[in-house]
Image (spheres, rainbow, N blue to C red):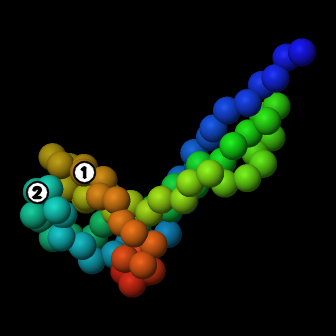
Amino acid sequence: MLLIFGLKTKREFLRWVAFVCRVCGQPGRAALVREVTKFSLFFVPLFPVRVRHVAECPNPACRARTKLSGEEAQRLA
């Protein structure tokens, strides 16, 4: 029997937020992104395994991705 399974992450842009990068310290408009990882069976996504929110630094030299909790993301949005 052959069983094909795996994980796939989809990124969804939520909005631009005013944010100070925790890595480079530069203020600016950061992209607030929700990443949803789903378990797939035979290439059909079945259920979410993980939901994560990140803020992406707008500085071209940095481009750091800062993990946010759900409450932080909701407050920023």
Secondary element under disc 2, as helix, strand or loop, is loop
Q: Which residue is mark 2?
A: 24
Q: Residue furthest left?
A: 25
Mark 2 and mark 1 in contact (Cβ < 8 Å)? yes
Name the spot of residue 63 as percent of width and height, x first: 25, 49
Could you tell whether 3 is left or right of 60 in the image?
right
Tell me which amino acid carries mark 2. Answer: Cys
Name the spot of residue 47 as percent of width and height, x first: 73, 53
Label 1 neighbourhood size at 10 Å, few (<14), some (14-19), many (20+)?
some
Name the spot of residue 7 as percent of width and height, x first: 63, 38
The C terminus lies in which quarter of the figure? bottom left
Name the spot of residue 17 as percent of width and height, x first: 34, 75
Tell me which amino acid carries mark 1. Answer: Ala
Q: Earlier in the sequence, mark 1 or mark 2?
A: 2
Q: Residue at x 19, y 55 (%)?
A: 59
How far is the residue under mark 1 from the one under mark 2? 8 Å
Q: Which residue is mark 1?
A: 64
